[in-house]
Image (cartoon, grey):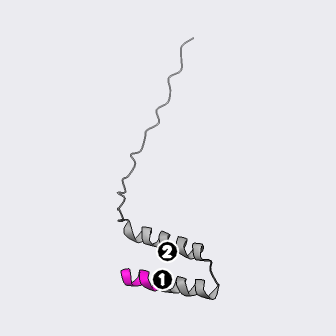
Amino acid sequence: MTEKIRMAQKTLDKAVKKGVLKANTASRYLSRLSTKVATPKTEKKITKKKAVKKVAKKVAKK
């Protein structure tokens, strides 16, 4: 995985050198990419919602 990050960094550096991207933009992209890779993915548990029975309200006596 780190090899892919290095390749992305090289590509961004080349883009900055050629003037396609600004240095801060490339830095921001690389930072966001590295944080996405560094954070562990957590699995969300899918739970079924219980059906709520609707009960008719009692009419008040007058």
Q: Which quadrant of the view contains residue 18? A: bottom right
Identity of the residue drawn at 54% across and 70% down: 28
Measuring 37% from the left and 80% from the top, which residue is drawn there?
2
Q: Which residue is mark 1?
A: 8
Q: Amino acid at mark 2?
A: Leu
- Residue placed furthest toward the right: 19
Circle 2 residue: 30
Q: Is residue 62 magenta?
A: no
Could you say where residue 25 lies in the image, as x and y percent from the top left?
Answer: 59, 73
In depth, the one of 60 and 13 nearer the eye is 13
Q: Position of residue 17 (x, y in %)?
A: 59, 86
Quote the CA–CA distance across marks 1 and 2: 8 Å
Quarter placement of the N terminus:
bottom left
* Circles 1 and 2: CB atoms closer than 8 Å: yes
Task: Give above or below for 42 relative to 22.
Answer: above
Mark yes or no: residue 1 visible.
no
Type of amino acid under label 1: Ala
**Residue 53 shows which numbered tag?**
none
Q: Nearer the viewer, residue 18 or 62?
A: 18
Asked which secondary structure carries label 1, the reply is helix
Q: Is residue 2 above or below residue 48?
A: below
As drawn, 50 above or below 60: below
Residue sitting at 38 percent across and 65 percent down? 39
Magenta residues span: 1-7
